[in-house]
Amino acid sequence: MPMQKSERIYRLNCFVENKPGVLARIVGLISGRGYNIQTLNVGPTEDGTVSRMKIDVLGTEKVVNQIILQLRNCVNVIEVTRRRR
Amino acid sequence: MSYSSRTGAQALVESLERAGVETLFGYPGGNVVDIFGFLRNSKMKFVLGRHEQGCVHMADGYARASGKPGVVLVTSGPGATNAITGLATANVDSVPLVLVSGQVPLSQIGTDAFQEADMTGICRAVTKHSFLLKSADEIPQAVAEAFYIATRGKPGAVVIDLPHDVQLQKTSAQYPERISLRAYHPDTAPKPRAVAELARLINSSNRPIFYAGGGVISSGAADDLRALSSKADIPIVTTLMGLGVIEKTSTHALGMAGMYGTEAANIALAEADLIIALGTRFSDRMTTTLKTKGKIVHVDCDPSSIEKNVSVNLGIVADIKDLITTVSSRIKPNSHTSWMKRISQLKRSSKNKVRKFKTSKIHPGAVVEAVAEAASDDAIIVTDVGQHQMFAARYYPTPKPRRFLSPGGMGTMGFAIPAAIGAALSMPNEKVVALIGDGGAQMTFNELKVASDEKLPITFIVFNNSSLGMIERMGEDSFVGNFSNPDFVMMAKALGLKAKRVSLVEELKSAVTNAVKSSHPSLLEVIVDADAKI
Ligand SMILES: Cc1ncc(C[n+]2csc(CCOP(=O)(O)OP(=O)(O)O)c2C)c(N)n1
């Protein structure tokens, strides 16, 4: 997909419950809506029951905000924040 | 009580009972036999569908009519995959539903075992949440969480996938008294600032209009909205899912807006200076006709639905009922005399207002009107998908919430027959009338046997236009292949229903009245004018 003018890469920082299926659910939520994940990094936190995901997605601000709201609706997602890269 | 000796299967049945389940829909299979063993003596009523899609639509109709979650039990593999269309249909319309699927034993997962399907993988995009359980100890907690998730925030479908060996493990785990999820806390309490801003906008507008979606009905806010509409003299248009919020004959009602909506509703939206959209996701069926220069306020319990399809001046995340009850006290009694004059003028001049059908063949709208005349206000109308559905949406007066059930978001043909069965089981004292196209009828006709086995006095009305109307009318010569009808009357009789056919205009009323008044499961095939336009 050619990059549109208003598109940028956004870094989403997600804290999610460390449970089976959570990664697939989050990736599916983003890719199922036709958005490409540029990089994805999953790692532990000090709390073993919580994982941290760093997801870089390319999109307009509106689209990325929509993705964040959908992620927050996800039953296993504890927190999502975003930052422009 | 000691629970130490029970199996996972038993714990599941107990947990469903604890969750308040009264009726369970489903279909057996190898990987759920042990659960079925405990259903015989359960206080839950088990209803055997004839196809898993039908089972899920039954649970869906049960939930839409009653507001209680619908519950389904199916086996692994084909049982689970057959349920997918039903899950998608319920989930997109925010219907609370819990489905338990059997799964192959844990040791066989991932081996392409007999009747193995990765259910949690397959259903991910069409459910609100899913669980794959690895131990019987998790069962009571998962059941409680599933019901919590299905009914909180924006309701939806939840799947519990339960491997066969887990059903056989012993557990002493107990059903939790309280549920608190770490990450899921939908906050739908209206914020004071938003309430104040909404009140200010309403009080200062000259041509306000309410745009009511299914969320008004599912949050139980229809009465409150009508009260506010009278107090502040504000007209109401609805979406397909919002039909039933207000009876169409009321002064403040404009009927359904959108692609198949009334002209009056669409023009009123265009002329309004303030649209207060409540519990709707602004589907494309609505936005294609939405032209307004006015301000838009969007209230929804789902934060992600605001600003998704339509830019708004004020977005409010709140439960619709809570919001309306809080804002009402701040809205001053008002009369928008000239705006309401315009509204009634629009209603009078609208091409789409209810009229007398004068054709030599039976007009589908006339069938809907005959049903409205014969049925009481409490009757539950269930539609399938197609032209007949849109005729029903336009001509049925929809006097009450939860009394007009239609698969709006997914547009699933085959919904009406099983959903009507579910609705009849949840509301045994109400008449249920299903309105079905001749195409959709052929998708789930098999489920009629359930209506006759359960002796449900449902009236099934098949609109026979000898075509897949909505699709065939799309272009001048749309190709649909070789579509033809069976003898619906003979088929219905073979399945144990009383059945009749009517084709003469003069006989329509009495035929519909007799069918609607029947205390038996009955089917009326109506030969309708295939050229009638919606
Ligand atoms: C499961 C499914 N498959 C296909 C469609 C596409 N579709 C929408 S309306 C329609 C025709 C419906 O025909 P019929 O049931 O005869 O109703 P009518 O429009 O004639 O009233 C079709 C094929 C659908 N909505 N659902």
Image: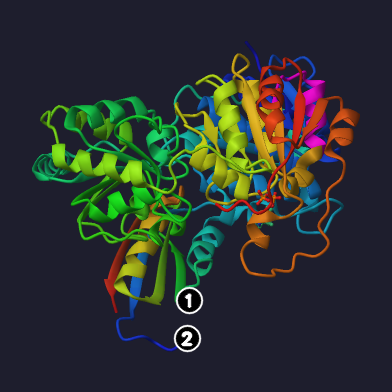
Please state if B339 lies on the left or on the right of B119 as rendered: left
Please state if B439 lies on the left or on the right of B330 as rendered: right
Which percent across, then down, holds residue A43? 45, 65
Tally of numbered discs = 2
Tell me the tag on residue A36.
1
Q: Amino acid at mark 2?
A: Met
Check contact, mark 2 vs mark 1: CB within 8 A. Answer: yes
Q: Chain of mark 2?
A: A
Which percent across, then down, holds residue B367? 62, 35
Tell me which segment is drawn in magenta: B446-458
Vertical arrangement, residue A58 with respect to residue A78, above or below: below
Residue B59 is covered by the magenta coloring: no
- Element type at mark 1: loop
C-alpha separation, residue under disc 2 versus residue under disc 1: 9 Å
- Front residue of B208/B321: it is B208
Residue B136 appears in view: no
Image quarter of the N terminus of chain B:
top right
Tell me the tag on residue A1.
2
Residue lying furthest bottom: A2
By secondary structure, the bulk of the magenta-drawn segment is best described as helix
- Front residue of B224/B164: it is B224
Disc 1 crowd, CA 10 A, few/some/many (<14, 14-19, 20+): some
Vertical arrangement, residue B533 with respect to residue B516, above or below: below
- Element type at mark 2: loop
Q: Chain of mark 1?
A: A
Tell me the tag on residue B425.
none
Q: Are marks 2 and 1 on the same chain?
A: yes
Q: Picture quarter containing residue A39?
A: bottom left
Residue B256 appears in view: yes
Colour mode? rainbow
Which residue corresponds to the image point at 80% horizontal and 18% vertical from the top-left?
Answer: B40
